[in-house]
Amino acid sequence: MEWQSEVVGRDVLREDPPPILVTNATMLEYMLVRNVDRPIIDQSQGKLRWIVIDEAHSYLGSQAAELTLLLRRVLLAFGCQPDQVHFIATSATIGSGEYAKHQLQKFLADIAGVDPSRVTVVTGEREIPELRSEFAGQHLPLPQPSTLQQMTPDERYGALVSCPQIRQMRKRLATSAARLTDLMSILKWKESPQDRLNMLALLDLCASARHGENEPFLPLRGHFFQRGQPGLWVCSNAQCEGRVGTCLDAAEWPFGAVFTDRREHCSHCGYPVLELYQCGDCGEEVLAATQVCESAEDWLRPLNVTEDVDEFQLDIEDLLTELEFRVSNIVPPYIFG
């Protein structure tokens, strides 16, 4: 079936503006100043009735001020007054409580240029399905994860609901977010790495347990915070003592100990430490270094990239293609400095 509501090009958009325009702040700014977009504004004079702002929580500080001024320019360009336009702000991460409600009212009132009393905050409440009565009153132990894994979703639902600790854990998650350590304390588990993995596996089983087709035992939404690792630095000594007794002690790994912070020398053997890179084509690991000739001898030293790169540049070449580097397992006549 051919799409009847799709505008496939800007020319069509300008000739016959659609009733709904999905755009962003940057393109909306362009539309107000570009002559080629003037037909959209001319044909829409006095017709603007709704402005929907998605992800409203992302507009803070100067961004919120810029959006406010932009929307006021939009009202002027389209020939409308604030009281003629309905503003809607949507977000899934706005806080709860009267203070958050008041702040949201003030935020949208400032953007729309209206009195806060004209702003209505509509919040959603989580609906928690009642547990099946034939299981909710039982006090059975929690089955082993392997046993739960082999059950059908309906059987798993009955086994989980029959355990009072799991019911308590469900009640805890239904009211607010919780850390893994909080949930582990309910089950009397230790805070060991293995128990954390077991807890994650149990939550996965709880989310997959269902009564019928549309009633999950524990629908979940996780928030995972991860800090980006700026790099890895590796000892250039293949016989490094730091690799002994670790997963690095294998024939496939041609280097020494691995460090997550920049340093010049290995704390295990004293050899130079170089930054680890991986080839984007073959996946081969290499250590990057610069070659310096001093006193008729070649020295390899850590590679320091100090050039500033414009992240908005269209074509950014890898700086390593412009800098000389050497793959380790380095042998004389190269000398580390």
Image: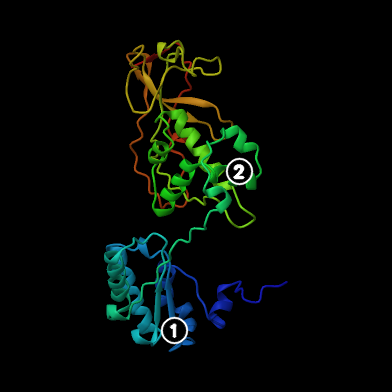
Per the image, label 2 sits on a secondary structure element best described as helix
| Few, some or many residues within 10 Å of mark 1 (<14, 14–19, 20+) | some
Residue at (43% x, 89% y) in the render? 46
Q: Quadrant of residue 67?
A: bottom left
Residue 17 image point, x, y percent: 53, 81
| Quarter of the image that includes the C terminus | top left
Farthest residue toward the right?
1
- Earlier residue among tags 1 and 2: 1
Q: Which mark is residue 307?
A: none
Residue 95 image point, x, y percent: 34, 60
Q: Which mark is residue 156?
A: 2
Considering only vertical position in the picture, is 246 above or below 156? above
Q: Is residue 100 left or right of residue 316?
A: left
Instruction: Residue under label 1, please give it.
Output: 48
In the image, what residue type sits under mark 2?
Arg
Residue at (43% x, 37% y) in the render? 319
Residue nearest the observer in this picture, 294 or 124: 124
Residue nearest the observer in this picture, 166 or 207: 166
Residue 31 image point, x, y percent: 44, 75
Considering only vertical position in the picture, is 301 above or below 175? above
Q: Is residue 1 left or right of residue 63?
A: right
Considering only vertical position in the picture, is 255 above or below 117? above
| Quarter of the image that includes the N terminus | bottom right
Per the image, label 1 sits on a secondary structure element best described as loop
